[in-house]
Amino acid sequence: MKRGLDAPICLTWELTYACNLQCVHCLSSSGQRDERELSTAEAKRVLDELRDLQVFYINIGGGEPMVRRDFFELLEYSVGNGIGVKFSTNGAFIDAEKARRLAAMDYLDIQISLDGVDAATNDAVRGVGSYDMARRAMDNLAAANFGPFKISVVVTRHNVPQLDRFKALADSYGAQLRITRLRPSGRGADTWHELHPTNGQQREIYDWLLKHGENVLTGDSFFHLNAFGESLPGLNMCGAGRVVCLIDPIGDVYACPFVIHDEFRAGNVRDAGGFSRVWKQSDLFLSLREPQSAGACASCGSFDACQGGCMAAKFFTGIPLDGPDPECVGGDGEHALSVVAPGTTPKPAMDHSKPVMLTRKKIANAV
Amino acid sequence: MRRLLSRTTTEPVVSVALDSVLELHPQVAVRPEPFGALAYHYGNRRLIFLKHPDVVRVVQQLAEHTDLAATLDACGIVPERFDAFVTALDSLQKSEIVRERVIAG
């Protein structure tokens, strides 16, 4: 599988950079719409291609995908062409009527983002009012008999102690819990150092996943923790450009959703040959499918278990790609981080954050 | 009516044997890959790697022959490998990639 697949099995498609929220860890620095975003017709052409490639399902995200006026049109077009859809949302637009409409559709999964089991923990990361927003969407989906939707949690220092309560919350809805790793991508680069789980918490997450792994989804994002011993369920490899990729709102294709940077941009769906050519022939993806060097980790006995960790996490913290993961459980990440020269970490290719309101800026300056 | 993720109660619980009469589950798509194929079940969302081209051929021809043994014969599988295929098909039945054949009528 490291040699790549004929078509991706985990394709994320961010439909828009527009978002009603401004989460401090947003991996795509979303906020404002980009005027170059794909039109409805262009998006449908991409879906036609994915159908021909026999892509089984796509993961739709953003920004907030439901702010697109053609959201339901694209959803129905995709499912109608045999491409299942899993979409991530903050829930703001799932009122009772939309919940019923979603519940009537086949081959659709919904992930509601929630980063704390209480408003205080969640809203500190996702913004004031976002906890109530997400819970209202869950209530509406439950009332509409949607079935088992997913509650999607980015694991931070502040919510590791809440893992059991997240599970209980999901169970109370008959929902499925999904927890994923915080990456220093997008605005996450600015907040990662304060938000990422501590070394002690890494062990806690690992033990918790070993206990609950079968019933909790992870997007296989915690494979760096396999260096603790027994492997967690999943692919246990970085899938970037091999089984995974990202299509961003303006059609750029990146190796994975967490590396929106020129260095990992393989092409654009508007280029001649479309997505298919980018997936099958781009220099970047072909090179990612070559055997990768273990570099500084070659002599470490845990390399087979952790595979050197996450490419995006290394890249945006300034660690060489053949160096250790910044959250290496053997402690090598801390040393690698300590030798990164200040101000040298790569910046994301684009920033669609909303401008900071002047009034807020003044207050911030006055403090 | 929305099809849910949960298992349906009509699925068989009988283990696969050489005389099992099977078919590819109608909600499963099989996509060829260099190592064999990927099978995806649109109902339970399971993605299964079929890591040998022989398994792929057998799975795709199940419905064309009287039973599993006849399918294996037709695909040129030598009898020494039959046990391994029974085990593999049993596992695929548990994942609902294949199922007991439903005779239309």
Image (cartoon, rainbow, N blue to C red):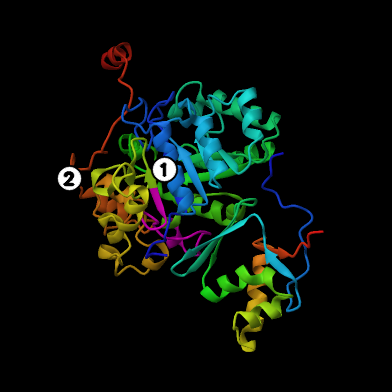
Q: Main secondary structure of the magenta part?
A: loop
Q: Residue A46 carries which label?
A: 1
In the image: residue A195, left or right of residue A96: left
Which part of the image, by quadrant, shows the N terminus of chain A?
bottom left
Q: Which amino acid does label 1 sit on?
A: Val
Question: In terms of secondary structure, where does tag 2 sit?
Answer: loop
Residue A58 appears in the picture as rendered: yes
Q: Which residue lies furthest to the front in this view?
A: B105
Specify the subunit that label 2 lies on: A
How packed mark 2 is, by other alpha carbons closer than 10 Å (few <14, some 14-19, many 20 or more), is few
Q: What residue type is labelled 2?
A: Ala
Give A167 or A29, whichever is nearer the viewer. Answer: A29
Position of residue A99 measured from the top left corner of the image (x, y, whole percent) = 63, 28
Q: Is residue B16 above or below residue A187?
A: below
Q: Is residue B13 above or below residue A45?
A: below
Position of residue A217 measured from the top left corner of the image (x, y, whole percent) = 55, 49
Magenta highlight on residue A260 = no
In the image: residue A283, left or right of residue B28: left
Q: Which mark is residue A266?
A: none
The residue that appears at 70% across and 34% down in the rendered structure is A145
| Magenta stretch in the rendered image | A225-245
Position of residue A276 measured from the top left corner of the image (x, y, whole percent) = 37, 52
Label 2 vs label 1, nearer the camera: 1
Q: Which mark is residue A341?
A: 2
